[in-house]
Image (cartoon, grey):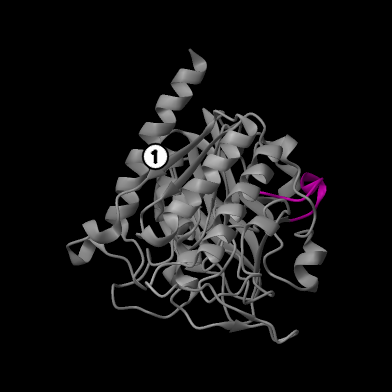
Amino acid sequence: MRNVNVYPINKIPELYFLGRDVSCAEKKSFRTLFWNGSGFEVHFKGRELWALIEGGFETLEPWLVVFLNGRINSRQMITKGKQWICLARGFDDSYETDIRVMKDSQPMADDPEHFIKIHKLALTKGGSFSKLPEHKMKIEFVGDSITTGEGLAGAVDDMAWIGCHMSFCKTYAYQTAEKLDADFRVVSQGGFGIVSAWNNNPYYVIPPEYENVCSIPKGKLYEKLGGYQKYDFSKWKSDFVIINLGTNDRGGFYFEPWTDPDTGKVYKMNLDENGKPCASDGAKITEGTKKFLYVVRKNNPAAKIIWATGMMYIPEVMGFIYEGISQFKNETGDKNVFTLEFDSMDCETNEEDKGSRQHPGPKTHRLAAEKLSMVIKSLYSTEKV
């Protein structure tokens, strides 16, 4: 790395940060990439661009993806410690290049030492940064492993639960944002549900985490990074909030009970004598759905909310989710809450269509992005008329 000027990340006014961040983050000497889809974007003129990136983990390493002019150029594991990574080299410095660097893996609830920080950029001497054009709208995506992109970077038979098999940049969420030229934020965690995780753990759920910057990984590191801070929704006002939750709540009905190691209390989503979700546990999903909509609406008063389901078929719980949505709309009179059912991953008939770990593959995500972007376009154009 020669003949470059080095810029602290907070000294580049043209840099646009992607994703949730802590209050006054722009004054810090580094930026933390908390969520999948977090990162930065810049336009630059110059032959080379480098980034000083710091990574950390105990068992589950973070992954980073680099886009050059809208196309994926590289995807790599970030090792422990600080390292200069070359983002672009050998470019014609007479024209602008767009570069986007994103965290491609989710924050890890099971590894509180997992993180990525961006410290500095280095640009060829004589090079320059320029201001990015504004996006047409803002979309927040809230979900589980489907929104995380689990299975989109692995072979069909790969079954290991590891970061390299997760790829947010290939999801329906990222594709939708690209189709609509939308800025986006993400809150997603594989295995988490509305009221129950896939394994009946009632603490691995999204609603209690939603109002914080990023509090899913528990421990001193994320507390120090500011992940437990309340997120300031006023700084980035969503036009749309897309919720894709419920798949893991279904899983709890078919998985063994979960025992809280601290209290000894046993949790289980139960089936009745007919093999259907028992009414009391179904009512928990209904109530959880309704309560979460109240939280989302409070923090996004002007947004249109779309609750999407279907990429992984969940017939046992969809009725309970829809009932919760109906109750919320009846209680509030809110006319800006909608439902959408995606095509199921059953449409994947060829190997290249499928994802790993029995998760939706490229075809299912592509179809979902096409359907969702059409719905958003129709709602957005109606709003502007």
Q: Residue at x 44, y 47 (%)?
A: 308
Residue at the far left: name it.
350
Q: Is residue 313 above or below residue 296?
A: below
Residue 199 appears left or right of 373:
right
- The magenta region covers 19-30
In front of the other: 160 or 77: 160
Q: Of helix, strand and loop, which one carries label 1?
A: helix
Report if residue 27 lies within the magenta region: yes
Residue farthest to the top? 385
| 98 displayed left or right of 328 | left
Which of the pair 251/179 is nearer the observer?
251
Q: Could you tell me which residue is drawn at 60 percent across and 29 percent down?
A: 333
Residue 165 in sight in this render: yes
Q: Is residue 194 visible?
A: no
Q: Position of residue 347 (x, y in %)?
A: 22, 56
Give the percent coordinates (x, y) of residue 182: 50, 35
Pointer 1: what residue?
372
The image quarter containing residue 334 is top right
Q: Quick check: is 375 in the magenta stretch?
A: no
Q: Position of residue 43 (x, y in %)?
A: 55, 38
Say which amino acid is labelled 1: Leu
Q: Residue at x 53, y 72 (%)?
A: 269
Picture layout, residue 63 above or below residue 301: below
Q: Quadrant of residue 179?
A: top left
Q: Quadrant of the N terminus?
A: bottom right
For the residue pair 376 and 281, the one nearer the viewer reads as 281
